[in-house]
Image: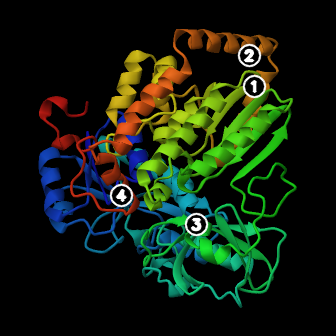
Amino acid sequence: MKILLLAHSFNGLTQRLFVDLREAGYQVSVELDIHDEITAEAVTLFQPDLLIAPFLKRRIPETIWRQLPCLILHPGPPGDRGPSALDWALLKQEKLWGVTLLEANATLDGGDIWGFETFPMRNTTKGVLYHQEVTDAASRITLNVVRQFETGSISPHPQNALPDAERWGEQLLMSQQDRKIDWQQDSQESVLRKINSADGSPGLLDSLFGHSLYLYDAQPEKQLSGSPGEIIARSGPALCRATADGKGVWIGHLRDRQSTHPFKLPATQLLADELNKHPSLEEVHYSPAMQSGYREIVYEEENSVGLIHFNFYNGAMSTARCQQLQQTLQQAKQRSTRAILLLGGENYWSNGMCLNQIEAAQSPADASWENINAMDDLALEILQSDHHLIISAVQGNAAAGGLFLARTADLIWARKGVILNPHYKDMGNLYGSEYWSYLLPKHAGIEHAQQISQARLPMGTEEAHRLGLVDQQFDCPHDSFLNTCKSEVDKLIHQPDFDQQLKQKRQQRRTDEQIRPLARYREAELEKMRLNFYGFDPSYHIARYNFVHKVAKSRTPTTIAFHRRPQRTAQS
């Protein structure tokens, strides 16, 4: 059966369905929603049995939904309609929410329901909910519905036939006024909820130092206090502003549409001149008891295992973040623990270099060179861990240099459902580093290494495990992944031959070094990277600019639009 995914962009949810449906054996192709005529052309070329829209910002043309079944994934329960479903759910503190797969018709989000699932809400950001609960539920619903459609057993229901469907109704696009912060009246909890409801996109519009700014990436301050609205302190990339109840909220990232760089940047970078007079707190915390500050990296120990939590916004690893994480790892390696878990964030383990900060630099080429060398220094620190078992515990998506950074560990454990993009080429044919030319053949074999690096496609944990990119996958809910990893690593370090395993690891590293030193892999990779950054071909710089400035694609890449490839290579 052939399924066409129609999406505004190839976002995380669309990638998850692309991966899961292909893994289930269906022929899947993707068309970006650029123009109605282009969509109609895609339908003619591919002749799909079913069209599924995971992420749209426009209606599907009537000429299309009248000729074949078109299903829309809506991030809300049956009966909820409108473009700001998760925003309203978070702002109104709904206790239960859901995902609905409904048929396209003349009424926006008003068609018959083919499947739905509900889940309990939690106090987090819109981005986390979307990447975790919404994406997991959407995958389960879609696979179930497709199977029923294939066997002819599907039985859609009108929305008004389902319990509680009338409770919701259509909700308008949420405006900035709907979640505007009143720093003289809003408590810490209220401010966090409002920013969280807008996190990712569009951001919450506010005013600071006479600038109109969009706020993102909020965390509660546990100890500091101040007068409502005042700036209390700065920590790492973030500023802390006092709320009406005397508490504080850390704001990690800002966006100024009127700036020379109208994209998300660290708050302390965008407002450097205004914030320099405020005290800076320690950026990295080595004890959970230290509660003050914006916490990107936290180290803790449990049962002879060191746990390094690093939660970088959007998985972006700037030069400074790489250096801070390397310092944390160096200190962790001095401890008398036996294993170290590298734990990224819920949304992303890592996506590699911080393209936004590179784009904002005086010399993006120099900033790129500094960033990739910092990534390599961190990768080398992981590779040269002689007396610890190092495990990358991947609970969020990982891509490009971030994924190969994870592969520098002795083991990669991934939560089933995360999406991996083990390639660099979509960023203007970037060659990549992080010792991937050593790591990929070592763990996946030469043939699989070629397949992984050249395909330029997202990959699920099933395929990654088959190819040797991932060592183990855990099929567990997001909220139990950490405990599962703790339990598994505890078993490993208490095996009778664990010390012998570490000895064999050291011997293997010495053998590999004799065959070809790590420095030579790095030199060869960076020689190609230098051409990407400083050479005559500007492809990387153009691709980075388009990515950072969110320039819409003018066509769907043939890497995912199989229907636009020559017939002999379709689905390859």
At a point 41% along the width and 40% down the height, the residue shown is 20
Distance from Cα at disc 3 to Cα at disc 1:
36 Å
Which residue is labeled 2 in the image?
502
Q: Which mark is residue 91?
A: none
| Circle nearer the N terminus (4, 2) | 2
Q: Are marks 4 and 1 in contact (CB under 8 Å)?
A: no
The amino acid type of the residue labelled 4 equals Tyr
| Circle nearer the N terminus (4, 1) | 1
Q: Which mark is residue 545?
A: 4
| Circle nearer the N terminus (3, 4) | 3
Distance from Cα at disc 4 to Cα at disc 2:
44 Å
Residue 253 appears in which quarter of the rendering? bottom right
Can residue 423 be seen by looking at this rendering?
no
The amino acid type of the residue labelled 1 equals His
Which residue is labeled 1 in the image?
388
**SS at mark 1 in the image:** loop
**SS at mark 2 in the image:** helix
Check the picture and name the quadrant holding the C terminus. Answer: top left
State whether residue 169 is above or below residue 363. below
State whether residue 493 is above or below residue 12. above
Q: Are marks 1 and 2 in contact (CB under 8 Å)?
A: yes
